[in-house]
Every structure is written in C-alpha cells, then in structure tokens.
Image (cartoon, grey):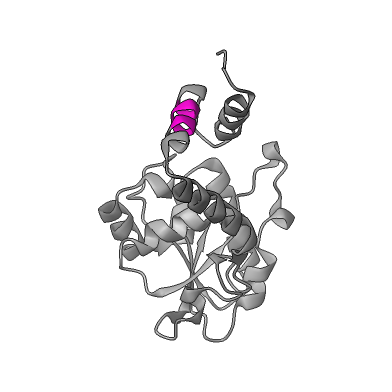
Amino acid sequence: MPFSSKIIEQAVEAFTGLPGVGRKTALRYVLHVIKQQEAEAHQLSDLIIKLKNDLKFCNICHNISEQHTCEICANPSRSNALICVVQDYRDVLAIESTGLYKGLYHVLGGLISPIEGVGPANLNISSLLQRLTADTQEVILALNATMEGETTSFYISRKLANADIHISTIARGIAVGEELQYADEVTLGRSITNRVPLDTVLKRT
C-alpha cells in the first residue's frame, strides 16, 4: 500500500502493532486522528503516555491500578475470605460486570504454557500462596477452560493441597475453550455463583 507521507506510513505501522488491527483498519484510525482537532489529538497522546507512566500493579493482587493498592483490595466491604484467581485484568472486569462477586482477586498475569515458555515462576503464584491468611476460606480458580487454564488450575490446587482452604472452580457454564472476556454477563455470573469444588472437575477429566 503506497503512502503519500512517511509520517502516515509510520503511524499505520504503529497501529498495526495493536492486537487485531490490520493495515486497512490502521489507516482508518490514522485518517481519523488527522481529522481530529489538535486538542483532541493531544488528549489522546497524553492518555497513552499516562497509561505507561501513571498506572501500577496492585502490590497485593497485581490488578492494574492508579495506586499501589487497588480499589478492590482497599475496599473494606469486600470479603477477604474469598480470593478469585484470574488470568489478567480483563477477567477482573468481566467478573465485576456481573455484580455478583464480593470477594477479592488475584491476577496471575498469564497461564502456564510450556510451549510458549511460560512456567509457574513467570506467574504471580508465589505471591498468591504468601497472601493466604487464617481469614482465607476459599480460593476460586476462575481460569479459562483451555488446556493452559486447566494445567494452571491443577498446579495451583496441588500447591494448596495441604492448606485448610476450600478450592473451587467456576461452574462450566463457560464453554470449554472459551475465554472469560468473551462470555456474556448472565453466563459468567451464573458460573461464578454456582462454582463447584475443583476436585469434582479434576475427577471428570
């Protein structure tokens, strides 16, 4: 695709670096930015810089936050008896959108995947084990129903085997192979509410 400007070409290349953005879509974004008012373009660029410079990871659950402790962990109305383990920030958003879960979260930052070179040491698993207290009654493994998700759930369950804690997983209203972020709110809400003991699921597989 020939461009009349090197700047446009570089901008298109930058946008195609985003997930799911092809060259035609990238060009559409670039042309939209060109037509924007200068103040709007500056606001967009300032927000992108803030995303990199001003956001942090919660020092307790590893959720994305503007503070060292995220709003969920700092909320006294949340139950510290429940810890829901998820893959990333998108899963926190998905479960929160149901309005049915009132416990805490722990964001792993990925899933165990030997093919991609991701092992337990690359994930936030050790910090999960360290944050368990006498108040912790249940750990909910809300991971994707994929081979990587099941492998990660099994690994964590073995690490928690000697702890006096109930281990559950979300009910499989979520289809096998489906990612949480693409599930509708009703199905996801039902899955988190009707969670089942992990051992029950492992015995079936």
Residue beneath the point at 32% across and 65% down: 193
Farthest residue to the top: give it.
2
Q: Is residue 39 magenta?
A: no
Position of 33 relative to 91 (above/below)? above
Find residue 92 and report its image quarter.
Answer: bottom left
Q: Is residue 68 visible?
A: yes
Position of residue 12 measured from the top left corner of the image (x, y, whole percent): 56, 28
Quarter of the image with the N terminus is top right
Position of 28 relative to 58 (above/below)? above
Magenta span dominant secondary structure: helix
Position of 6 relative to 115 (above/below)? above
Residue beneath the point at 44% across and 49% down: 40
Residue beneath the point at 53% across and 73% down: 70
Farthest residue to the left: give it.
186
Find residue 155 and report its image quarter.
Answer: bottom right
Position of residue 203 measured from the top left corner of the image (x, y, whole percent): 48, 52
Residues shaded magenta: 25-31
Find residue 185 and report its image quarter.
Answer: bottom left
Position of 109 relative to 6 (above/below)? below
Position of residue 42 measured from the top left corner of the image (x, y, whole percent): 52, 50
Residue beneath the point at 37% across and 74% down: 102
In the image, 164 versus 124, the foreground residue is 124
